Image (tube, rainbow, N blue to C red):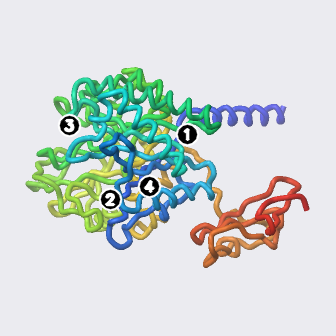
Amino acid sequence: NFSFTLLFCFTAVGVLLALHTVSSNRLVCHMTNWAQYRPSIAKFTPDNIDPFLCTHVIYTMATINSFNQISPVEWNDEQQYNRLNSLKNVNPALKTLLSVGGTVNGMSPFIAMVTKSESRAAFIKSAISFLHTHNFDGLNLAWEYPGHNGGSQEDKERFTLLVMELSKAFEADAKENRKTKLLLSANVAALRPTIDKAYEVSKISLYLDFINVMSYDYHGDWEAATGHNSPLYRSSVDSGSHIHHNINSSVSHWLAQGAPAEKLLLGFPTYGRTYRLRSIATGLGALANGPADAGPYTRTAGFWAYYEICDFISSATVSWISEQEVPYATFGSSWVGYDDKKSYSSKVQWMTANNLGGAHVWSMDMDDFDGSFCSAGAYPLINHLRMSMGFPPKPTTTPSPTTTRDAVVDFCRGRPDGLYENSADKTTYFQCFLGNTYLHRCQPGLIYWDSCKCCNWP
Ligand SMILES: *[C@@H]1O[C@H](CO)[C@@H](O)[C@H](O)[C@H]1NC(C)=O
């Protein structure tokens, strides 16, 4: 009877785990190639990425040139692609995608490219070869948005054609070159009128591997009253179309239009949006007049990175908007609506209850990525997200019985990247990467040989 109960427990846990892994199992993190220009400790490059933190990293941003070919933007992009993709030597399960989008002379470069089937074909051909050359696993489309900002009505159908043709070409490429099929994803709008004008939702959903709903920027300093950047639900101060400026409304709409839940990723911002208060009122819906001062590191008025918010809330008054399950903070005439561990937990609960495919984070470089500001370790928000989603602990520095923990942790300090023998236990070996130590185990029966840098028979 006891063993039956035990078996039943294991089965129940197994089923729960299986259910869990089929739904919210993607943690996609965006990084931006302009974060390298932030000053001092806020400077961010692929070398700041923890290779075990996210399941996918999206490198933002590449563009499209006048020959309809995908092309880099920054002087050092190709060097940075190499740094990013070398993280896969440390974590072979990590997937990387290159994001294409932005604007050229104020217009999306997609607008001209999608007009003709020949120019789409040129883009697709260039993208496949570029992704393979630089060892990316896929492409992310970041067009804000088809049919908007100078585009035409036909963009909606042309975007569908682009997505379909990309997917077919990726399939043909995989067969021809005996490679894993390249991934295809897109960053998409969150507001209902924009969604309706930009996408044939059920059609594009067939061809995209996952869909990054940009569930943030719902409110900001362009409005005359305070509102939250990324609320989970509507608030009682919302009226008119503002009742739809929240996650629950956006994702419901994507689902109602025919997107499968398991392809939708919920957007988690690592930043907040700021206002300058106009009166003594400090709550949600208080009168405001433009943004608070720019942050000292992001240096753009209107938003603050989470690490800048950590500094701010050390002296500010923090409040919780219980209707919307998100916090805001105010000090003097500055007001910021942001996300913290608690709001991330609420959103994860909502995300898993709705069987979404997972999370995407905008962006890695705005979390406290090296732990300098928030006294909560490196990547406090994304690590919390990872843990809340039920991912197993990261496989770094596993102590082995014959080696003390400190010796393992310190092994790679000052050593060049590469593989090393573990003299205390030949069935394991060390991999050093950027001074961090990773302990790997050979297949059963094999031991590590430094002569071939491989595991082989004793
Ligand atoms: C969430 O969205 C659904 C579908 O639109 C709606 O029925 C429900 O009332 C919303 N929940 C809240 C708390 O606003």
Judged from the image, the secondary structure of the residue bearing numbered disc 4 is helix
Image quadrant in which the N terminus is located: top right
Percent position of residue 220, x then y: 21, 47
Q: CA distance from mark 1 to mark 2?
A: 26 Å
According to the picture, the residue beneath numbered tag 4 turns out to be: 381
Specify whether residue 208 is in view: yes
Which sits in the foreground, 296 or 316? 296
Label 2 secondary element:
strand
Marks 1/2 in contact by CB < 8 Å: the verdict is no
Position of residue 272 measured from the top left corner of the image (x, y, whole percent): 29, 53
Amino acid at the residue labelled 4? Leu
**Mark 1 or mark 3: which comes first in sequence?**
1
Considering only order in the chain, which callout, 2 or 1, is on the residue closer to the N terminus?
Answer: 1
| Location of residue 224 with respect to 156 vertically, above or below | below
Report, in whole angstroms, how far the alpha carbon at label 3 lies from the one at label 2: 27 Å
Q: Are marks 4 and 2 in contact (CB under 8 Å)?
A: no
Query: Residue sitting at 16 percent across and 63 percent down?
Result: 332
Is label 1 within 8 A of ligand 1 (CB to nearest ligand atom)?
A: no
Residue 38 position, x and y percent, is 32, 66
Estimate the spatial distance between the alpha carbons at disc 4 and disc 2, rounded to whole Å.
12 Å
Indicate which disc residue 174 carries.
none
Q: Secondary structure at mark 3?
A: loop
From the viewer's perspective, tell me whether residue 290 is left or right of residue 326: left
Which of the two discs, 1 and 4, labels the residue nearer the N terminus? 1
If the picture is divided into quarters, which one holds ligand 1? top left
**Residue annotated with mark 2:** 305
Question: Circle 3 sits on which residue?
Answer: 149
Amino acid type, residue under disc 2 in the picture: Ala
The disc, 3 or 4, on the residue closer to the chain's N-terminal end is 3
Mark 1 is surrounded, within 10 Å at the Cα level, by few (under 14), some (14 to 19) or many (20 or more) other residues, namely: many
